Amino acid sequence: MCSRRQLMTALVTATLVTAATTATAGCAAHSGPDRTPSPRAEAERTARLALDGFLAAYNRAEQSSDASLLDPVATGPYAETKKAGLRAGRALAPAGPPEPEPLRLTDPQFAIPEHGRFFLVHTDSNRDAGTDRADSRVVLVFTRADPADPWRVAYVSVIERSDLPVFRLTPAGWAEPVAPDARDVSVPPTELSRRYARLLTDGTLDGFAPGNATTGRRTVRARDAEQPGLTARFEDRPAEDGAYAAVALRTENGGALAFFASRHVDRLTLDPTAKGAVSPLTTGVRALMRGEFTDTLTRESVSTQAVVVPPANAPGRGVVFVAQAQGVVAATAS
């Protein structure tokens, strides 16, 4: 069976093809006797063009392992992790990767704020066909700092359809963005990255629900730190400036679906004389590594999270993770 992590890996390594230009998703309302497209319909047309442009550039980047081709269409945490993956791929296969089976994205559904600096599109894909993840949706978040800037993808997540909440819409079909400092949700979007970094550091849940990405991640770290001959130290930092800022859309129940990023550094020191000691080096890390490994490896990674944030004061478990992906972006050996 294909896990969500495997599906996410397939997403960031495969050639992408979209049916966005032929699908009939989202609002296509027209107004007036001359059938002038509504502002919402025009916004979706622009969003479709942005999606098509992203996929075309992604295609070229994958085929050539040229990370620079993503510069016009990707930004923030997605750009950093994907470009690191492409650089590693070029180092491992200078002649280029074998041509992958295209990843087809169909049934695009758009959630577009009227005056926001971002929009969301979720699609179906052929990568989960015949697996226990057949109901997953590929979610892309496009952002821009200024209306004159092009739309670029900042977040990509794979979310189970059952975990994808229904968004609150205006009568005209616009999605409602949640303000970064909103206090009508249990955790303001702007605080998610900082609180998560603190949780991983000292275990304070501070609004997050227990689960694989929270308490479970700390358990895995503790277990990894006990491997024979290996000493592990971890550092967690928020990533919240510029294109790394959290974004969130209002859900029907008054909560939010939010996306945020975080940075993580793990320093692994190996005693090669210890019985059962295993080197922490992997092929992918070697491709990004600077220096010669003797006994210490420092890995820097960026993690992206999609979370469901409940309304403020709502009973329940707290902020729940519905997707998480982490990629190594740099490594130093000594």
Image (spheres, grey):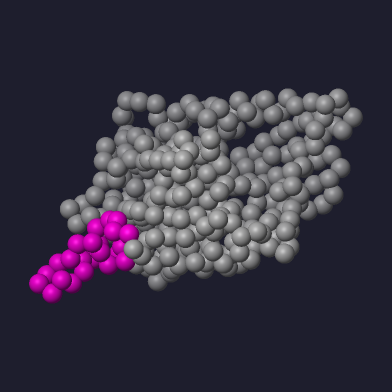
Q: Is residue 184 above or below residue 217?
A: below
Task: Find residue 222 and report its horizontal and vertical position in percent.
Answer: 66, 26
Task: Find residue 51 and report its horizontal and vertical position in percent.
Answer: 42, 62
- Place residue 167 in its image quadrant: top left
- Place residue 277 in its image quadrant: top right
Task: Find residue 217 and report its horizontal and vertical position in percent.
Answer: 58, 31
Q: In the rendered picture of this protein, how many numbered marks are placed on residues?
A: 0
Q: Residue at x 33, y 55 (%)?
A: 110
Q: Is residue 31 magenta-colored? A: yes
Q: Residue at x 31, y 35 (%)?
A: 311
Q: Residue at x 39, y 26 (%)?
A: 317
Task: Find residue 38 and report its horizontal and vertical position in percent.
Answer: 20, 66
Res. 26 visible in picture = yes
Residues drawn in magenta: 23-45
Res. 246 visible in picture = no
Q: Residue at x 32, y 34 (%)?
A: 312
Q: Residue furthest bottom?
A: 34
**Closer to the camera, 108 or 212?**
108
Q: Is residue 242 magenta-colored? A: no
**Closer to the camera, 310 or 17?**
17
Q: Residue furthest right?
A: 273
Q: Residue furthest left?
A: 33
- Place residue 267 in its image quadrant: top right
Q: Residue furthest front?
A: 130
